[in-house]
Image: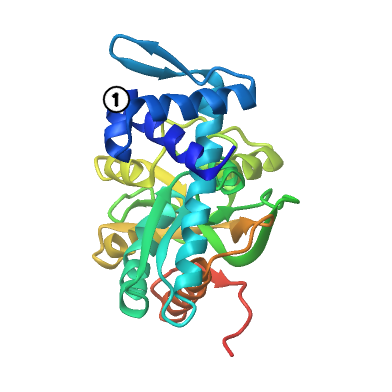
Amino acid sequence: MDVRQLRYFAAIAQHGHFGRAAASLHIAQPALSRQIKLLEEELGVQLFERHPRGAAPTEAAMLLSDRAAFILRYLEQVRIDVAATQGDPRGPVALGMSPGLALTLAPPLFEAIGDRYPGVQLQIVEDFTDSLQERLLHGTVDLAILNGPDVEQPNLVTTKLMDEQICLIGRADNALFPSGPVDVRTLPSLSLVMAGVARSGVREIVEMAAAQAGVLLTPKVEVQSLEVAKRIILRGELFTAHFAAPIKQDIDSGLLRATPIHGMHLTRFTARASDRPASRATTVVMETMTDVVRTLVDRGLWPHAQLRLLPRG
């Protein structure tokens, strides 16, 4: 197996057609077919099933596709890093984070990366912690911010970034809104919109805290994103338990309120795969991201958050 064969394989997987793949690679179709046949013989599997409309990947091809994408992407980054040893970092960096976190962090991070490192192409991948861990291990993201508590794995290098308080969020004019910080035992008496994915992130913390307190949560509706939860809350007397930072603008405008729920917080970690070195571009994205997070917290733009980073300098 060589890099050329992986490039040929990736082109067919992308186009789903030998002829179109050959055209995109600027080679003759028989030469392409011959290399794929050699690759299949070496691996001992069939990679594509030909049909009148093109070529469908087999189960083996779908597995190889993930690995090939990582290898080709990593080799390209190595080429970029070596070529740019005397210049500024360049190349793509895929950074994974939860959708709620992206609402707060992605805009200022894009701006900071653009100002400091215009040669770096930042891609924000919105997903939840379990999926992001798999993406890190498969090499489809370079760096991720994971939500604890169970994120430490032997194949990942993780560093604590921050603790973020989970708050009760509702309309500011909701007469049922408690006057101050609340206890988890208060939640069953409120009409809740449960936001997040079961057994992950915010929702896992909320459900674990309720179970430890011996209370049962029966939400009126369950959604995945805070944005959808917010829109439902704004239509009535419902509440959600989530982070306040993504809705800071609504809080500042007097539309929503957020008050801490005692003992309920989530630790965020930065993470990358331990079995390969970080590219120069990935390293500067990590450094810039921590600077942006520190600045947002220090300036009060990230409410109810406490840094776990080492002090600057």
Whether residue 289 is visible, yes or no, is no
Quadrant including the C terminus:
bottom right
Q: Residue at x 31, y 78 (%)?
A: 115
Viewer-proximal residue among 130 and 79 = 79
Amino acid type of the residue tagged 1 in the rendering = Gly
- Residue 203 horizontal/vertical position (percent): 54, 42
Reading the image, the residue beneath label 1 is: 19
Q: How is the image coloured?
A: rainbow
Left/right of residue 215 with respect to residue 87 in the rendered view: right
Whether residue 172 is visible, yes or no, is yes
Q: Residue at x 39, y 13 (%)?
A: 50
Q: Residue at x 32, y 31 (%)?
A: 28
- Residue 101 horizontal/vertical position (percent): 43, 56
Left/right of residue 287 with respect to residue 251 in the rendered view: right
> How many marks can you see?
1
Viewer-proximal residue among 109 and 207 = 109
Looking at the image, residue 269 lies above or below residue 184: below
- Residue 237 horizontal/vertical position (percent): 32, 41
Quadrant including the N terminus:
top right
Q: Residue at x 54, y 61 (%)?
A: 165
Left/right of residue 288 with respect to residue 136 in the rendered view: left
Left/right of residue 202 with respect to residue 274 in the rendered view: left
Viewer-proximal residue among 83 and 194 = 83
Considering every residue shown, the one lying at the far right of the view is 154
Looking at the image, residue 124 lies above or below residue 25: below
- Residue 311 horizontal/vertical position (percent): 61, 84
SS at badge 1? helix
Looking at the image, residue 213 lies above or below residue 59: below
